[in-house]
Image (cartoon, rainbow, N blue to C red):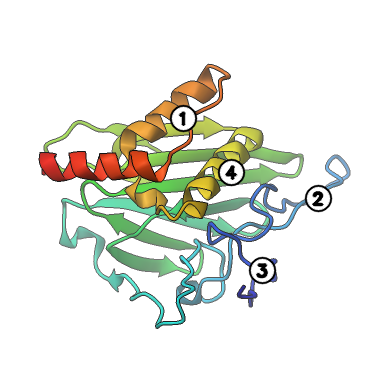
Amino acid sequence: MIGLGLSGTAPLGLSGTGSSDYQEPKCHLSPFNLTGNRALNLANKESFGFLLTSDRLWTDGGPPPRRPAETRVSDDPGLTHVTLIWRENSHQDWLKFGRPVVARIINRRQRIESYAAGQVFGLVRWASNDYGTIRSTLDIVRAVNVTEPCIPVPQVDPGGDLLLSVHGWPKVAQVFRLIDAIEASGIDPCDVAPDHWRHIHNRLAGREVPRDYSPVRHRAWLQRKALLS
């Protein structure tokens, strides 16, 4: 396992976040809020040490994956742009998973990552005030092309195909566990069938247990995708 640097969080787990995957980020303490938890994200070299988003780890001993190219946001109107913000003890955004094609640092607290049509990513947004957490959300979104209809999603421009959306840390942590189970089976969550995220969303909304996403189901999806392309 690889230890972290500037962020001071614990060694990394399957998802590329810390061993505190299922704990809320640390929020500012007040007389009304006496407990806090460690932040999930890890230090990002491109953000000068600020915790904006997590980089996927590599374990094969080879060179690290190539960084997304930096570009002007307006260079390609067909891309979907995700704004990630970090403000200490009050606002933290990060990607549970995703493979951006381009990235741009705006300042020490903000960056934009962009996705091509068809790519899927998981955006986590957390915010707090002096009284504790006021928002914990996980949105799994498929980027769409300019001819497709899309749903407005906060901090996602112009929006996207919203496959799954959960609110409240207990539900967010529950989906984290499902994502980590998919990764443990050797499947990248970025490549999971979009219908499976919809299935998880609907099952959780109905207080039911989602089905597992097995390698057999994944191969069937890849074959179907190849036939449709």
Q: Is the C-beta separation of discs 1 and 2 under 8 Å?
A: no
Residue at left 25%, top 33%? 150
What number is the disc on residue 29?
A: 2
Q: Secondary structure at mark 2?
A: loop
Residue type at tag 4: Arg
Q: Nearer the viewer, mark 1 or mark 2?
A: 1
Q: Quadrant of the N terminus?
A: bottom right
- Counting residues from the start of the chain, the first of labels 3 and 2 encountered is 3
Q: CA distance from mark 1 to mark 2?
A: 34 Å
Q: Where is residue 87 shown, x and y percent of the image?
A: 59, 58
Q: Which mark is residue 216?
A: none
Q: Residue at x 17, y 62 (%)?
A: 75
Measure the C-alpha gap from mark 4 to mark 3. 17 Å
Q: Nearer the viewer, residue 227 or 133?
A: 227
Q: Which residue is mark 4?
A: 177
Which amino acid lies under the numbered mark 3 shown in the image of this protein? Pro
Q: Would you name the residue on which mark 3 appears?
A: 11
Q: Nearer the viewer, mark 4 or mark 2?
A: 4
The residue that appears at 50% across and 40% down in the rendered structure is: 138
Residue 173 is situated, as x and y percent measured from the top left of the image, at 62, 41
**Tag 4–tag 3 contact (CB < 8 Å):** no
Pointer 4 or 3: first along the chain: 3
> Separation of disc 3 and disc 2 at Cα?
25 Å
Say above or below: 145 vs 163: below
